């Protein structure tokens, strides 16, 4: 009995250590910085030989692989990291409701990706008001589907996914436009699958 009791703290400590090191966040060295990204397959984004390291294929389609970057970078750093660090095609494009639903689903279902309670969070995308026309920079397609957050009027600038868990109703990663491109946010990179 005494033995059991004295072992309990060791067991608890072991569990805590396991939980701490059992993380899904990997690190890539880039430009003298450590860039953290989410590195695990989920129900929505699967491992695929079509995808580069750190990228996962969205299960609803066969054209694109995605990387969720948790390091906070300025808009231009995030965009450059996607191509020069991760070797992808650029920041994410969200052309349809299906894309939006899966990408937001991934963020809200993974603790490492979601904003913690009562905090706010942004993810950079490749969306940009390009000379008056909202365009996905990475695919060069003008917006067809839109999901702007109703709490703010879209204007000139760059598009981020936005959550504020203290707001009611919460924006829940609807879209927000911002000109504050020096703000450091998380981001999502993508690359197109080259058919073999
Ligand atoms: C993706 O490709 C696989 C293998 O070729 C196929 O089984 C699947 O139906 C495709 N999925 C979609 C959404 O097109
Ligand atoms: C734009 O969206 C509409 C409605 O979802 C769809 O019917 C149409 O095919 C889309 N057009 C393009 C060019 O993707
Ligand atoms: C895009 O930016 C232009 C200025 O370049 C602005 O006049 C226009 O209202 C913006 N478009 C949207 C849909 O916000």
Image: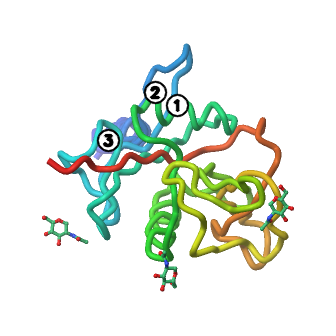
Which of the labelled discs sits on residue 15, or is there none? Answer: none
- In the picture of the structure, the residue carrying the numbered disc 1 is 81
Residue 103, position in %: x, y? 47, 63
Q: In this view, does 10 lie above or below 29?
A: below
- In the picture of the structure, the residue carrying the numbered disc 3 is 2
| Pointer 3 or 2: first along the chain | 3
* Tag in front: 3 or 2: 2
Q: Which residue is drawn at 63% across and 31% down?
A: 77
Q: Which residue is drawn at 77% across and 67% down?
A: 166
Q: In this view, does 18 lie above or below 161?
A: above
- In the picture of the structure, the residue carrying the numbered disc 2 is 85
In three-dimensional space, the C-alpha distance between marks 1 and 2, rounded to whole angstroms, equals: 5 Å
Q: Is residue 14 above or below residue 61?
A: above
In three-dimensional space, the C-alpha distance between marks 3 and 2, rounded to whole angstroms, equals: 54 Å
**Could you classify mark 2 by the number of other residues whose Cα lies within 10 Å: few (under 14), some (14-19), or many (20 or more)?**
some
Q: Residue at x 54, y 17 (%)?
A: 31
In three-dimensional space, the C-alpha distance between marks 1 and 3, rounded to whole angstroms, equals: 55 Å
Please indicate whether residue 106 sits to the left or right of residue 147 in the image: left
Q: Which residue is drawn at 43% across and 48% down?
A: 190
Q: What element carries label 1?
A: helix
Q: Is mark 3 on a helix, strand or loop?
A: helix
Q: Do the residues labelled 1 and 3 touch (CB within 8 Å)?
A: no
């Amino acid at each position: 009995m005494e033995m059991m009791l004295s072992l309990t703290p060791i067991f608890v400590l072991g569990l805590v250590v396991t939980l701490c090191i059992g993380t899904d966040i990997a690190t890539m060295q880039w430009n003298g910085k450590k860039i953290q990204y989410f590195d695990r397959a989920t129900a929505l984004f699967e491992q695929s030989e079509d995808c580069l390291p750190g990228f996962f294929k969205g299960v609803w389609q066969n054209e694109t692989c995605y990387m969720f970057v948790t390091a906070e970078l300025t808009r231009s750093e995030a965009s450059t990291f996607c191509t020069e660090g991760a070797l992808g095609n650029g920041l994410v494009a969200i052309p349809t409701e299906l894309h939006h639903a899966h990408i937001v689903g991934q963020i809200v279902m993974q603790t490492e990706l979601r904003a913690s309670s009562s905090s706010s969070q942004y993810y950079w995308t490749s969306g940009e008001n390009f000379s008056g026309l909202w365009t996905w920079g990475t695919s060069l397609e003008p917006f067809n589907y839109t999901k702007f957050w109703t709490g703010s009027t879209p204007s000139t600038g760059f598009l981020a996914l936005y959550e504020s868990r203290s707001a009611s109703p919460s924006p829940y990663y609807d879209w927000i436009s911002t000109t504050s491109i020096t703000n450091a946010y998380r981001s999502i990179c993508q690359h197109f699958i080259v058919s073999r």
